[in-house]
Each structure stands twice: as structure tokens, then as C-alpha cells.
Image (spheres, rainbow, N blue to C red):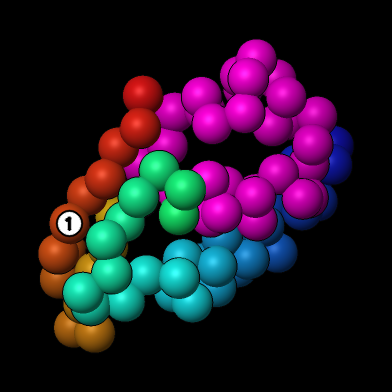
């Protein structure tokens, strides 16, 4: 139930975290992806724990778009 109730604010927090951390010229590292993941895990730690056993091992896909909405880069962590 917590995930359903928190879906909208969770999505907004993830978007805000990614937008504040990722800018033109910034190298998107594993550490940066972990910081974006923290925005998700704050809302529903049970879901975060259920998706992986160790920190930093959750599959993650991040799509980076420019101001016009065009995809600039897609980063995946399996």
C-alpha cells in the first residue's frame, strides 16, 4: 500500500534529484546513480530492500533528455 500512496511524490523526488545532479558535461558515475536511487528508497525502504540484497545492485535505467525532450543518453545498471 505504501508504494501506491507514495508513487507520485516518489517520481517527483527522483526527477528532482536527477535534474539537480545531472547537467551537461557531468560524468554520470555509479556514485551519482546511487544518489538518484536514494530519492526512491526514502519513500519505501521495504520496496527498495525487496528489489536487491546489497546497496547499489538494484537494476536502474536513467534516460537523460535535453531541454527539448530529446533523448541524449540512456544509462543502465543491471
Out of 30 and 11, give the one closest to the viewer. 30
Q: Is residue 69 visible?
A: no
Residue 1 spot, x, y in % from top left: 85, 37
Residue depicted at 65% across the width and 15% down the height: 53
Residue 25 spot, x, y in % from top left: 21, 74
Residue depicted at 71% across the width and 44% down the height: 41
| Above or below for 4 versus 48 | below
| Above or below for 69 versus 64 | below
| Above or below for 37 versus 70 | above
Whether residue 8 appears in magenta in the rendering, the answer is: no
Whether residue 50 appears in magenta in the rendering, the answer is: yes
Residue 8 spot, x, y in % from top left: 66, 61
Residue depicted at 30% across the width and 37% down the height: 76
| Above or below for 6 versus 22 | above
Residue range (magenta): 33-62
Out of 77 and 9, give the one closest to the viewer. 77
Q: Is residue 71 visible?
A: yes
Q: Quadrant of the C terminus?
A: top left
**Is residue 23 left or right of 13 when viewed as pictured?**
left
**Is residue 51 left or right of 45 when viewed as pictured?**
left
Q: Secondary structure at mark 1?
A: strand
**Is residue 44 left or right of 23 when viewed as pictured?**
right
Residue 23 spot, x, y in % from top left: 31, 76
**Is residue 41 left or right of 66 when viewed as pictured?**
right
Q: Residue furthest top?
A: 53
Residue under label 1: 73
Residue depicted at 28% across the width and 69% down the height: 26
Amino acid at each position: 500500500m505504501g508504494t501506491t500512496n507514495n508513487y507520485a511524490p516518489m517520481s517527483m523526488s527522483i526527477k528532482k534529484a536527477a535534474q539537480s545532479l545531472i547537467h551537461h558535461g557531468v560524468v554520470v558515475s555509479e556514485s551519482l546513480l546511487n544518489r538518484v536511487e536514494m530519492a526512491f528508497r526514502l519513500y519505501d525502504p521495504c520496496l527498495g530492500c525487496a528489489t536487491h540484497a546489497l546497496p547499489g545492485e538494484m537494476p536502474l535505467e536513467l534516460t537523460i533528455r535535453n531541454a527539448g525532450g530529446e533523448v541524449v543518453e540512456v544509462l543502465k545498471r543491471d
